[in-house]
Image (tube, rainbow, N blue to C red):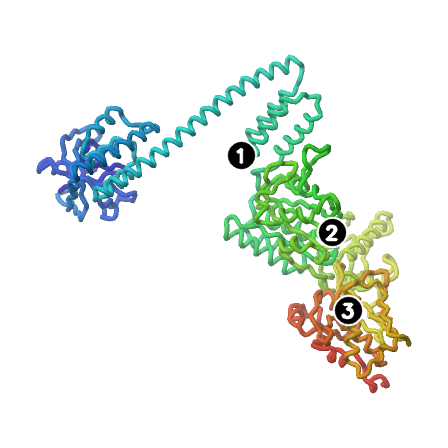
Amino acid sequence: MPMVALRGMTLLPHTTVHFDISRSESIEAVKLAMAADQYLYVVTQLEKDNSQGFQKDSLHNVGCVVKVKQIIKIPKNVVRVLVEGEYRGELITFEEQDSCYQAEVRIWKDIDLSSEEEEAYCSSLLDAVRACYDAGMKINTAALQKLSKQKKAAVLIDMLAEQSPFSYEKRQAILDIEDLHERVKYVLTLLHSEAEIYQIRRQLQEQLKGCVERNQREYVLREQQKLIQEELGEKDASDTQEYRKELERLQAPQEVQEKLRKEIRRLEAIPVTSSESTVSRNYIETLLEYPWSKATEDNRDLRQAERILNEDHYGLEKVKERVLDFLAVRNMVSAGDSPIICLAGPPGTGKTSVARSIAAAVNKEYVRISLGGVRDEAEIRGHRKTYVGAMPGRIASAITKAGVNNPLVLLDEVDKLSNDYKGDPSSALLEVLDAEQNCRFVDHYFEVPIDLSQVLFITTANDVSRIPKPLLDRMELIEVSGYTQNEKFHIGKEFLLQKQRRRHGLKAKQFQIDDAALNRIIQEYTREAGVRGLERQIAALCRKADRVIAGGERKSLKITCRNLEQYLGIPKYEQNVWDIEPKTGIVTGLAWTSAGGDTLSVEVSLTPGTGKIELTGNLGDVMKESARLAISCVRSMLEEDILKEQDIHIHVPEGAVPKDGPSAGITMTTAIYSAVTGRKVRGDIAMTGEVTLRGRVLPIGGLKEKLLAAKQHGIREVLVPERNRKDIGELSEEITGGMRITYVTVMEDVLKCALLSGKDERE
């Protein structure tokens, strides 16, 4: 039979409807149907592009066989067709013939139901329709009465679907069900769902109506209050009106807006002369100033970010690589968790300035919070606004200062947090630095959640061991170790010199330092892991240049090795001053401190006595245990226990400096063994490693800083635990070059390398 495809409309059997057609093939199909037996197949199109003609997959599988009752031509070549639905029909195939589409259709006829089934189905359907009508569904009353007279379930379903405000997709779903029982179940489920939807919509409308009425009432009362305040001479009304205008412009979470509305209403009820009025005003202004929805767009150009990092800092490859990794992840994922990076290393290695460069590289606002000496938990979480002088915490204040909700916040000196009876700030930071919790961080002053998930937190620390373990677990640790001689030279020449010139108003042609003089400053006037002391020396030379030029003595100043002592004085340090003469009972060890690596001597003397042990040099508990362990280890290596008749005195010089750690184990053992046996220890050798009771050598940390310290003091050979071999592989040739590194596993290896034989001593 002829076929017509409709868009956005579904026809059902047992219904009489009209539709408009304008396509030539559809008009021809209607004419052909009228010329034959008036039967026409009507099917609904799918939401596809049918500009190139219809395909079977662009039409629904089930349509309706209708009988054409009337054709009316209307303007603009449109034909209005009145049809009456007869049967459901499944589309088998179709083809274009006689200027229209001819379809092969399989007719679906409904099964006959028993009278009991008909009555049960009809009554259930009518009850569901009435429930929808009561809930607010728009159904014509006359149509509802007509439906109640229908006794055939199949006819009732089709008429009901036509009279109800269903979408054509739902009508198509009803049309697609061939089995009458399943069709009834589906329609009942659909009607119950519609009833619930209309019930919810009616409740929402009632709530909205109540809200509108309440707002109108508040408006009238507010106007009355405004007139009363004007009569009393109070000016508070204008301020609250301004707060309301700012609140309307504020894009903040719903709970924040509700909190502000409540506080503004409270402010209106408080007399202007009351002290609570000032507290309420400060609170409202603080919440209005916070950047709830303001944000900067992150830089996604990796090359530009890499260029900025390289321009600002020399070296620090691990830090730069981690920042570029973070940017790469942000480019691939629209919204990812911001990492919490901890830059750990000695002072003066550029940790704080690295954070500023990272902010510039990722295009974030930069805010620094110094945590050194903070011991009050309220500094992080804020004070309750009921207290006198209450204010937000440092985190919320920093974001307000930045003006955006996604800045880079530097938490400087996180290892120097303290605590007292007022709380533990490090515990308060656990919530701030936890990606799972900081999306709803609650500041005690704000009393509403703050989203910190978009903030990029970077922390700095000198000594990681002083950071509480739970807090350290939330951070990604990146070690910023000390600089080598070559790195210090490049940093001084390419960064520090230009920086100090700008600060002291000097141009490049007015003040210069040649390479030899800069190297001498590094070697003889500074001895540190970072470059802070080097910057001070360059600043001192710039001051001398300002004085010389401002005094008119000369127009420019160039620092060379010849005039360096004239401006900086005699050198503070001498190269290779370490006494490398072999000695008995004195061994050079390597130590790691928060300020970098250092060398230390362990001295042991034996005197006749009863085996008493004396430890001096301001040693910590761990180091004292290492000393006792070393004595036991030496006793196990001796054939005869001669220590029970000797008093042992172990001293580590510079007694005012606290010392602790397990890495002096092999150093103490070697010194005690040398003192007992009388064999001398090489003066050009240093060692580091932890020792066990059985003489095994265990690995240690801070190896780069220790090797740098050994090289600065002219040490020729360093004994390192075998299990630290992998750490040596990561160090540059500049650190390890010119120095012999020997790997040891047990104390026998250490003694073999460190002690001189009798022949060597005679020579």
280 lies above or below 431 = above
Mark 2: amino acid: Lys
- Tell me the residue that label 1 is attached to: 254
Closer to us: 49 or 543: 49
Residue at screen point 15% across, 37% down: 86
Residue that badge 2 annotates: 416
Of circles 1 and 3, which is in front? 3
Query: How far, Cα to Cα, is label 3 from label 2?
Result: 27 Å
Residue 626: give its label: 3
Q: Residues within 10 Å of mark 1 (few under 14, many from 20)?
A: few
Q: Secondary structure at mark 1?
A: helix
- Residues packed near mark 2 inside 10 Å, few (<14), some (14 to 19) or many (20 plus): some
**Residue 252 in the image, given as x and y percentages of width and height:** 55, 35
Instruction: Tell whether 81 sits left or right of 468.
Output: left
Residue found at x 85% / y 84%: 761
Q: Which quadrant would the N terminus be assigned to in this image?
A: top left
Residue type, mark 1 in image: Gln
The answer to whether the residue labelled 1 contacts the one labelled 3, judged by CB atoms less than 8 Å apart, is no
In terms of image quadrants, where is residue 686?
bottom right
